[in-house]
Image (cartoon, grey):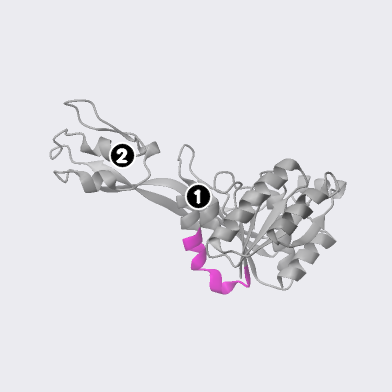
């Protein structure tokens, strides 16, 4: 079963709950935790897992044959990411960090002067501890398109999925492309939120996205004792989405977090039982 731990807003405790839930589920099941917050992966830090690189993530980029190039500027005109600059009577200037690999320049070149090559845009790591396996993707610095790394991580995981009872995808914040990529193919999404106005705002965005993607969703209300719970309860009723757990803010959670130990609590066990 593939489950996404998501939630829209950053700082709600999404990764903390994802790691704790993975450890709880692994007591009776084989679990793979997948960190697809590739801009800033931190599950390995929370669990103190020593990662080892297993794969480089590559992206297509163009390559020019200047003997064939007639300096017409067509490639720069079709480039939507402005990664190709053209000065009159000069060869194109290529900025690889901005390239999305769409191939528009290759397809439009009238003299077939542009071919394909590749650049590294990220890495995939693997590690194990606390009875769970972890796959972690990481975007290379200054690269702009994180969903390509998310897609590569998912492709890598697809070759492993038969070994596991549960695969937990810890997504990044927001509702943009890398989150959409992570949510696709999941059978359940757990939206982690907090009882604040910002929590309500971003939770509604993620619930609307789940509806568009046709992914069933449940809500986990974290730090339920530090704000107005009614804000989240009203939103849950509005969207007809169940709150499956309410987690208190406790000092012992902070102490375990700072020691790189997974959170242990009855609320985490409750979520695990509901999943089973």
Residue 39 seen in the current view: yes
Magenta part, dominant SS: helix
Residue topped by disc 1: 177
Please give left or right for residue 193 compared with residue 37 in the image. right
Q: Which of the 4 quarters of the picture holds residue 164? A: bottom right
**Which residue is depicted at the point 65% across and 71% down?**
30
**Which x, y percent locates residue 115?**
23, 47
Neighbourhood count class around disc 1 (C-alpha, 10 Å): few under 14, some 14–19, many 20 upward: some
Q: Distance between the residues labelled 1 and 2?
A: 20 Å
Query: How many circles with numbers are drawn on the protein?
Result: 2
Q: From the image, which quarter does the C terminus lie in?
A: bottom right
- Magenta segment boundaries in residue numbering: 154-166
**Secondary-structure class at tag 1:** helix
Residue 54 seen in the current view: no
Q: Earlier in the sequence, mark 1 or mark 2?
A: 2
**Which residue is depicted at the point 48% across and 50% down?**
147
In this view, the residue farthest toward the top is: 88
Residue topped by disc 2: 79
């Amino acid at each position: 079963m593939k489950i996404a731990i998501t939630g829209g807003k950053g700082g709600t405790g999404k990764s903390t709950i994802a790691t704790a839930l993975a450890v709880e589920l692994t007591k009776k099941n084989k679990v793979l935790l997948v960190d697809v917050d590739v801009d800033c992966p931190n599950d390995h830090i929370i669990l103190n897992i020593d990662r080892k690189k297993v794969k480089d993530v590559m992206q297509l980029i163009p390559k020019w044959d200047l003997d064939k190039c007639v300096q017409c500027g067509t490639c720069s005109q079709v480039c939507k990411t402005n990664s190709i600059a053209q000065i009159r009577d000069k060869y194109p200037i290529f900025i690889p960090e901005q390239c999305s690999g769409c191939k528009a320049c290759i397809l439009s070149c009238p003299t077939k002067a542009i071919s394909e090559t590749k650049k590294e845009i990220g890495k995939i790591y693997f590690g194990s501890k606390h009875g769970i396996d972890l796959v972690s993707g990481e975007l290379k610095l200054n690269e702009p398109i994180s969903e390509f790394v998310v897609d590569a991580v998912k492709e890598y995981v697809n070759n492993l999925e038969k070994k596991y009872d549960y695969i937990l995808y810890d997504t990044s914040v927001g509702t943009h492309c890398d989150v959409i990529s992570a949510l696709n193919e999941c059978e359940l999404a757990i939206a982690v939120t907090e009882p604040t106005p910002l929590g309500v705002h971003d939770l509604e965005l993620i619930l609307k996205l789940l509806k568009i993607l046709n992914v069933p969703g449940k809500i986990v209300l974290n730090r339920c004792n530090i704000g107005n719970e009614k804000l989240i309860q009203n939103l849950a009723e509005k969207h007809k989405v169940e709150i499956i757990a309410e987690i208190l803010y406790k000092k012992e959670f902070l102490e375990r977090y700072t020691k790189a130990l997974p959170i242990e609590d009855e609320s985490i066990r409750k979520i695990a039982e509901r999943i089973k």
